[in-house]
């Protein structure tokens, strides 16, 4: 085992895969000579060369499309968006090309590509740099959408994403690249579509993903002190979704609260709540609640930003609401 | 080979095209890409071209005609003098048959969702991933999987673990009606109690087993209101009268027996009672007479029950009372055993209650025989409709002085006509006549009634 | 016309002879006939949705295919002619247009999404200009693997205004990718003529912005197209980087089957039909190669047979199997 930063866990995943398979290449802004805007790809240019670690001009639509074409022609590109905010200028490529080529071609061409980059809150960056794109991509059949909270999950999931023959949207977080976590020395891969129970409990099922896990874990500690025992499910995959873990947990507790970054309306939490309500109707003891960003474009100043984000306080309130019902 | 040339489908949304102008005339030779006509679609005016060389043999749609996409507008052929009579005949047939909805050539029906039998209750909580037509699909397809929760079986009479499987709406209804959920039979999925179940419990109705039958089709259409007419919505009473009497009218095969009673003795009897201070009406006496007659001819105190006839034990006489907007029949219970004064008291009380709208259901249902008296309205004679499920109803006309023949001499006497309607399934002609004779016995000799 | 300073005046291809030109002639005629049948099928609701016909532009696809048969092609939604020039059979094409399981995209794509991996025909795209960045990726893979192949990317004058197009030019030149960008300039972007779409009407000038080699020429003569595309392909194949060709052409029909093309000035179509590629090559064959009318009639007859056969095949083919509805969303593991 080693205690490494998440950025290093991600780097290891890419390096290990690129050593096994020379059709894999990394492409994006500042990934090569700058060693990565957030230093995730540090040292990779040196190891793999300019043909496999490729700097791009600021042309997301252009290089996302290039990656997709290369994937169709049999390579396995990793396309980095410096942040997922910028992916929206490449939205047409991801949604209309990557997600649909397998279907349009009647199964002749697959698109084994990974789009990765930091997503969501990055503190005091204003509204255009704070977007959570989860639901924008999870919506479409043909894509897979994956995220992590811990270093262990980051490495195992990125390796699985690179090996997947389908386009994978891999959501990272700028704020947690420096967080350390234990990562095994032996090779391991975490299959996509499996959630992880980060804390077992019996009173309420608390569902989350991405770095929101850390906020949820803090809330869980406080709730334990208040005598409420929550079970935390870290989904890890938004598409595919681990229905089994989800529903079994709710069947056990009878209560569910979902907390995620991003807006409430038409967020992925709404979809999960709908599924829980449909599958677990007979054992629900309370409505399914969601704790998310407040419905405003992200403000810059700290006090307002804290107000907007789904905080431990609001999570604790929601859990108490479903328990005291 | 002559062929139809059809109105083209110029755009996905086009349903009908209008022929604006013909660019070729019948008999003209055609080359590929020659413009045949100009046509207006939903989007624009378009020139339609022919695909092959040939001749325009017949124009089927005139300028200005609207033709659905896919329908013929002309007949084209490879030579100028082809015989197109069979095509023309076909065209006339198609026109006569009426417009057919053009079908998309490659439309395929959606695969029928096969409704399988409800699965047995699960023994384990488990998930079945979404599958399609028996095949596994990729886990990243986000259709809803099936998730079944194994719930502990209910101990007989007791809800499991203190929880009855019920919907929130059902629980709210149970609270409102003061109903114990555990006592409600659930008809929702896997025995879940629904709101409808709770409401049924509250109304004392058993759970439905079959779909409600369709109402019969109308042979005669309903009337419509003309200007100046007033449309009066039906009250519940009107609706009930309509329903019950229509059923009686259509179900029971009835016949009518009319008799004229000599009421001279009746008039004396009643006058004497009046002088003695007993307020008894003629109708009261008729009620008493019928009640006692029903004891004499009990077969007329009965009801048709399809595979049996129910012989009533009690004589409960319904008395038709007119109300504004309808009528109601309060019941004099055990009329055969009551003294006339008692009957009179009952009828007075019931009539008042009826007019005040204060009759309870117990007071206006359950009669075994009904009397309808329109004598006070100067109706000499009429036929009444049976009050179902009774076997007979007596229609009593006005009592009036009439010229009579007595022992060869013309005199004046009090006479009253009554008509007995009988359900022939229960009461035959002879029986009906016997019953009327029994009534006559009491009317014409009221002393037999006692007081 | 802008002759390129960098492309040679003549390509490395040998001149055509009677046989090779007859072959090109037949290819164009087959495309023409299949497209006409597609138009007829559309009016009979056997083809649904959108249908964009290539009639009048056949020389561009057929000329380009002469030197790039084994290269990668990618195109937009007016791609029936291009797919057939690349080798997709009339049967596979017609069946796909009819939405049948025997279509080259298994009935999943329809008119706008013709794909054939066997022929390296990589689609068939409905977003104007959206596919152009993909050409760079295909070329990237070919270059990395040292295949010696180019990617030929077809698009129209309308697409040359799209952001994705500019980004693609930028990246292609920066990375020196073996792409031949072919802008088929038929002077109309849907219903809007070029001069109302773009401040410059020489679309090849867009290459100047990124320093790319470019050429503009009329493509009504299949021999001209054949030579110039070969020259461009030679250039790119040799590792010199991409080329932008603007080939002036004309479509005889509207933008799609729903468009009566009323925006064309009177007489323009008749005037342009005088440059009908099929007529041009027909004249060349009879005048300069001594091909007889009978030979031409025989070619026409064989084309007719092949075209009608594709119709019958499409009619008789089965619809896609509903049981496979979910099979085309995700590639299975191990692919």
Image (cartoon, helix red, strand yellow):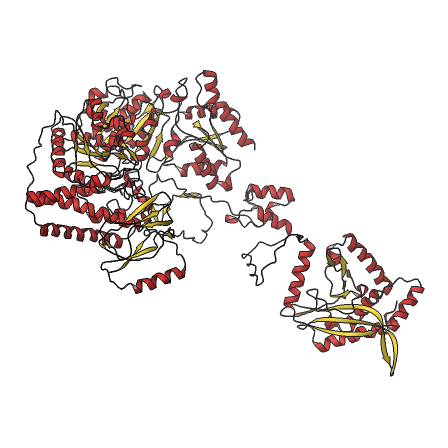
Q: Quarter of the image holding residue A174?
A: top left
Q: How many numbered tags mark residues here?
A: 0
Residue B394 screen position, x and y as percent = 75, 68
Residue A44 screen position, x and y as percent = 23, 21
In the rendered structure, the answer to whether residue C24 lies left or right of residue A24 reads left
Residue A5 screen position, x and y as percent = 32, 20
Q: Quarter of the image holding residue C188?
A: top left
Q: Which quadrant would the C terminus of chain C be assigned to in this image?
A: top left
Seen in the picture, residue C57 relative to B262 is either above or below; the reply is above
Seen in the picture, residue B398 relative to A238 is either above or below; the reply is below
Q: Is residue A62 visible?
A: yes
In the rendered structure, the answer to whether residue B301 lies left or right of residue C229 reads right
User: Which residue appears farthest toward the right when viewing the image?
Assistant: B275
Q: Which quadrant would the N terminus of chain C be assigned to in this image?
A: top left
Of residues C139 and B156, the one nearer the viewer is C139
User: Which residue appears farthest toward the bottom when viewing the image?
Assistant: B408
Of residues C246 and C96, the one nearer the viewer is C246
Residue B66 screen position, x and y as percent = 39, 51
Q: Quarter of the image holding residue B175?
A: top right
Q: Is residue A22 visible?
A: no
In the rendered structure, the answer to whether residue A31 lies left or right of residue A181 reads left
């Amino acid at each position: 085992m080693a205690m490494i930063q998440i950025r290093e866990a991600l780097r290891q995943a890419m390096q290990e895969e690129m050593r096994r398979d020379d059709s894999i290449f990394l492409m994006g802004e500042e990934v090569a000579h700058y060693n990565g805007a957030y230093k995730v790809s540090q040292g990779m240019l040196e190891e793999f060369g300019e043909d496999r670690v490729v700097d791009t001009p600021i042309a997301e639509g252009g290089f996302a499309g290039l990656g997709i074409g290369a994937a169709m022609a049999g390579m396995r590109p990793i396309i980095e968006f410096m942040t997922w905010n910028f992916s929206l200028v490449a939205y047409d490529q991801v949604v209309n090309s990557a997600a649909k080529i397998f279907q349009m071609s009647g199964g002749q061409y697959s698109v084994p590509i990974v789009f990765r980059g930091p997503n969501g809150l990055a503190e005091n960056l204003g509204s255009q740099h704070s977007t959570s794109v989860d639901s924008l991509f999870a919506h479409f059949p043909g894509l897979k959408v994956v995220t992590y909270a811990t270093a262990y999950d980051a490495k195992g999931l990125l390796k699985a994403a690179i090996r997947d023959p389908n386009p994978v949207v891999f959501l990272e977080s700028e704020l947690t690249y420096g967080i350390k976590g234990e990562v095994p020395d032996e090779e391991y891969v975490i299959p996509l579509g499996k959630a992880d129970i980060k804390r077992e409990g019996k009173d309420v099922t608390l569902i989350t993903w991405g770095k929101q896990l850390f906020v949820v874990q803090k809330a869980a500690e406080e709730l334990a002190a208040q005598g409420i025992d929550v079970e935390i499910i870290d989904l890890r995959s938004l598409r595919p979704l681990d229905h089994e873990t989800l529903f079994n947990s709710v069947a056990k507790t009878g209560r569910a609260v979902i907390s995620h970054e991003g807006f409430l309306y038409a967020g992925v939490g709404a979809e999960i709540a709908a599924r829980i309500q449909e599958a677990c109707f007979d054992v629900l003891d309370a409505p399914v609640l969601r704790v998310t960003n407040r419905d405003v474009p992200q403000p810059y100043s700290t006090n307002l930003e804290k107000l907007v984000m789904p905080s431990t306080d609001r999570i604790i309130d929601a859990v108490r609401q479903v328990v005291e019902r | 080979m002559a062929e139809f040339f059809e109105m083209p489908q110029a755009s996905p949304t086009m349903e009908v095209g209008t022929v604006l102008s013909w660019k070729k005339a019948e008999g003209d030779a055609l080359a590929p890409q020659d413009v045949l006509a100009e046509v207006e679609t939903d989007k624009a005016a378009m020139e339609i071209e022919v695909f092959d060389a040939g001749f325009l043999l017949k124009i089927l749609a005139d300028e200005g005609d609207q033709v659905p996409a896919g329908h013929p507008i002309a007949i084209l052929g490879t030579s100028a003098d082809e015989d197109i009579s069979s095509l023309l005949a076909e065209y006339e047939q198609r026109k006569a048959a009426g417009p057919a909805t053009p079908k998309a050539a490659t439309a395929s029906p959606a695969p029928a969702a096969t409704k399988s039998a409800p699965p047995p209750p699960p023994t384990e909580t488990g998930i079945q991933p979404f599958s399609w037509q028996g095949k596994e699909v990729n886990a990243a397809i986000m259709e809803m999987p099936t998730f079944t929760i194994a719930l502990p079986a209910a101990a007989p009479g007791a809800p499991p673990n203190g929880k009855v499987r019920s919907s929130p709406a059902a629980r709210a209804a149970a609270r409102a009606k003061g109903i114990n959920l555990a006592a409600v039979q659930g008809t929702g999925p896997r025995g879940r109690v629904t709101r409808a179940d709770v409401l049924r419990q509250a109304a004392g109705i058993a759970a439905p087993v079959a779909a409600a039958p369709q109402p019969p089709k109308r042979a005669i259409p309903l009337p419509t209101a003309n200007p100046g007419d007033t449309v009066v919505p039906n009250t519940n009473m009107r609706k009930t009268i309509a329903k019950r009497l229509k059923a009686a009218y259509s179900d029971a095969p009835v016949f009518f027996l009319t008799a004229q009673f000599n009421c001279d003795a009746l008039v004396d009897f009643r006058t004497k009672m009046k002088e003695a201070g007993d307020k008894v009406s003629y109708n009261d006496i008729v009620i008493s007479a019928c009640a006692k007659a029903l004891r004499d001819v009990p077969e007329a105190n009965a009801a048709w029950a399809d595979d049996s006839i129910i012989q009533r034990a009690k004589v409960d006489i319904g008395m038709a009372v007119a109300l504004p907007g309808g009528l109601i029949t309060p019941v004099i219970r055990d009329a055969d055993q009551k003294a006339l004064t008692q009957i009179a008291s009952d009828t007075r009380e019931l009539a008042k209650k009826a007019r005040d709208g204060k009759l309870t259901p117990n007071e206006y249902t359950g009669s075994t025989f009904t009397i309808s008296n329109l004598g006070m309205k100067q109706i000499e004679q009429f036929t009444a409709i049976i009050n179902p499920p009774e076997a007979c109803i007596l229609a009593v006309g006005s009592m009036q002085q009439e010229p009579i023949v007595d022992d060869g001499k013309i005199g004046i006497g009090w006479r009253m006509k009554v008509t007995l309607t009988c359900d022939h399934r229960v009461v035959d002609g002879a029986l009906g006549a016997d019953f009327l004779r029994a009534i006559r016995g009491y009317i014409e000799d009221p002393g037999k009634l006692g007081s | 016309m802008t002759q390129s300073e960098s492309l040679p005046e003549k390509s490395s291809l040998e001149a055509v002879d009677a046989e090779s030109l007859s072959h090109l002639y037949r290819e164009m005629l087959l495309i023409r006939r299949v497209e006409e049948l597609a138009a007829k099928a559309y009016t009979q609701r056997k083809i649904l949705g959108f249908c964009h016909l290539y009639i009048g532009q056949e020389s561009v696809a057929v000329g380009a295919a002469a030197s790039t048969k084994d290269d990668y092609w990618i195109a937009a939604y007016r791609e029936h002619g291009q797919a057939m020039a690349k080798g997709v059979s009339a049967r596979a094409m017609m069946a796909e247009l009819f939405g049948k399981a025997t279509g080259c995209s298994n009935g999943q794509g329809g008119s706008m999404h013709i794909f054939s991996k066997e022929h390296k025909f990589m689609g068939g795209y409905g977003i104007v200009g959206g596919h152009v960045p993909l050409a760079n990726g295909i070329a990237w893979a070919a270059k990395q693997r040292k295949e010696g192949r180019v990617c030929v990317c077809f698009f129209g004058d309308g697409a040359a205004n799209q952001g994705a197009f500019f980004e693609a030019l930028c990246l292609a030149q920066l990375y020196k990718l073996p792409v031949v960008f072919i802008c088929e300039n038929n002077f109309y972007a849907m219903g809007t003529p070029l001069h109302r779409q773009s401040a410059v009407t020489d679309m090849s000038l867009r290459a100047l912005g990124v320093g790319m080699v470019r050429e503009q020429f009329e493509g009504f003569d299949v021999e001209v197209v054949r030579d110039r595309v070969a020259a461009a392909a030679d250039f790119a194949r040799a590792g010199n980087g991409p080329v932008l060709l603007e080939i002036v052409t004309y479509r005889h029909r509207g933008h799609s089957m729903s468009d009566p093309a009323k925006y064309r000035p009177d007489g323009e179509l008749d005037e342009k039909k005088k440059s009908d590629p099929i007529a041009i090559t027909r004249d060349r064959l009879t005048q300069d190669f001594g091909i007889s009318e009978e030979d031409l009639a025989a070619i026409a007859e064989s084309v007719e047979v092949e075209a009608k056969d594709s119709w019958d095949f499409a009619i008789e083919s089965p619809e896609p199997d509903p049981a496979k509805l979910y099979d085309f969303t995700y590639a299975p593991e191990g692919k």
